[in-house]
């Protein structure tokens, strides 16, 4: 911040001298020379990002004169939003709680190699590889240009660019309104917490003290109903006893990680609420697959392979009801 103040004073002094030198031929003040990405973030008062980068040991990379990077820089408000969703008081508590390795992975997911301006993002490919590697390949962000430039992350939420093309000496910074959540860093509960469309599910898990279980090593496969799915059977859920709600919730969980490529279509699958089972059938479009439970209406799988550190989440549009409860 002091460095920014000194640059501002210098620019102001040059402009004053130029204005006083001649009434007929004023000399324009030179634009301040760009500084590194790390200093740009500091000058922009992106304190949460700077604190995370410092703990993650990434400040040297963001200061490297030869780096040539594009950084999607979450605002302080974006860090605070993620922090409260994950149960922390604010961004500072989030940064203090997460291990340096986790912060490094999260921040690398916000970095694209090369200097890519907003116009190039809009006219470029539908996905962009990041510096974060997952599954032996660069993790990607889906690019959206509807309603401005945006990026969809591994938890299926969108970050919008709110300030584009902030020039730095070693790249460019785009300020975004959400922290991008990468695959494989947070556990299945945290991944669900990071997406506001799963608040009914995570609230139910917390009410039945199932969060510690699903935060353990696992791995688990969770078929996660959306908020709309819970709303559709609100009266049914309200009538359940505590043990019955436990059964419903664990009926959405499989022991072990089952990615979409490994779903055993047409074969009864035993859930954590054993011996209760359900059967998954491929399609029909636009659903990826459907799950037959004890009711006459199947649940459609509408998104797959939200990868967590301890398993995977598949999104469904209906709460599964087992028999017996």
Image (spheres, rainbow, N blue to C red):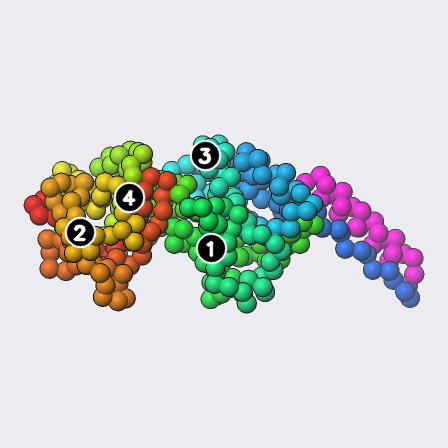
Q: Nearer the viewer, mark 1 or mark 3?
A: 1
Whether 259 is drawn above or below 145: the answer is above
Instruction: Tell me if mark 2 has few (under 14), some (14-19) or many (20+) residues whose alpha carbon lies within 10 angstroms of its own.
Output: many
Q: Measure the alpha-carbon separation of dots 4 and 3.
A: 24 Å
Q: Measure the alpha-carbon separation of dots 1 and 3.
A: 22 Å
Point out residue 290 in the picture as x, y percentages from the top left corner.
21, 59
Q: Secondary structure at mark 4?
A: loop
Instruction: Tell me if mark 3 has few (under 14), some (14-19) or many (20+) residues whose alpha carbon lies within 10 angstroms of its own.
Output: some
Of the image marks 4 and 1, the number of the one nearer the N terminus: 1
Question: Residue at 41% across / 41% down in the picture?
Answer: 185
Of the image marks 4 and 3, the number of the one nearer the N terminus: 3
The residue wearing badge 1 is: 141
Q: Secondary structure at mark 3?
A: loop
Circle 3/circle 2 CB separation < 8 Å: no
Question: Residue at 26% across / 67% down in the picture?
Answer: 285
Question: Residue at 29% across / 36% down in the picture?
Answer: 218
Query: For residue 169: magenta?
Result: no
Point out residue 221 in the picture as x, y percentages from the top left corner.
27, 45
The residue wearing badge 2 is: 320
Range drawn in magenta: 1-22
Residue in the foreground of this view, choosing between 312 and 1: 312
The residue wearing badge 4 is: 257
Q: Quadrant of the C terminus?
A: top left
Query: For residue 18: magenta?
Result: yes
Q: Nearer the viewer, mark 4 or mark 1?
A: 4
């Amino acid at each position: 911040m002091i460095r920014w103040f000194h640059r501002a004073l210098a620019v102001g002094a040059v402009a004053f001298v130029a204005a006083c030198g001649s009434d007929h031929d004023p000399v324009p003040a030179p634009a301040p020379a760009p500084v590194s990405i790390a200093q740009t973030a500091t000058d922009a008062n992106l304190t949460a990002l700077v604190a995370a980068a410092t703990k993650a040991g990434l400040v040297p990379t963001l200061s490297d004169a030869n780096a040539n990077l594009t950084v999607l820089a979450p605002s302080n408000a974006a860090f605070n939003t993620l922090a409260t969703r994950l149960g922390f008081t604010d961004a500072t508590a989030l940064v203090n709680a997460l291990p340096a390795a986790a912060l490094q992975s999260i921040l690398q997911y916000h970095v694209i190699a090369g200097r890519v301006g907003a116009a190039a993002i809009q006219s470029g490919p539908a996905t962009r590889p990041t510096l974060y590697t997952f599954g032996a390949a660069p993790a990607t962000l889906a690019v959206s240009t509807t309603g401005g430039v945006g990026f969809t992350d591994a938890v299926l939420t969108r970050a919008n660019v709110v300030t584009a093309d902030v020039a730095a000496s070693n790249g460019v910074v785009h300020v975004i309104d959400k922290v991008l959540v990468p695959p494989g860093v947070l556990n299945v509960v945290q991944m669900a917490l990071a997406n506001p469309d799963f608040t009914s599910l995570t609230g139910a898990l917390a009410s039945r003290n199932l969060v510690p279980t699903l935060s353990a090593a696992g791995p688990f496969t969770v078929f996660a109903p959306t908020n709309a799915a819970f709303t559709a059977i609100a009266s049914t859920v309200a009538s359940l006893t505590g043990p019955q709600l436990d059964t419903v919730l664990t009926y959405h969980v499989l022991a072990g990680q089952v990615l979409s490529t490994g779903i055993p279509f047409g074969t009864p699958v035993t859930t954590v609420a054993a011996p209760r089972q359900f059967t998954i059938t491929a399609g029909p479009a636009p659903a990826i697959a459907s799950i037959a439970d004890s009711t006459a209406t199947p649940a459609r799988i509408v998104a797959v392979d939200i990868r967590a550190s301890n398993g995977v989440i598949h999104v469904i549009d209906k709460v599964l009801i087992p028999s017996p409860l």
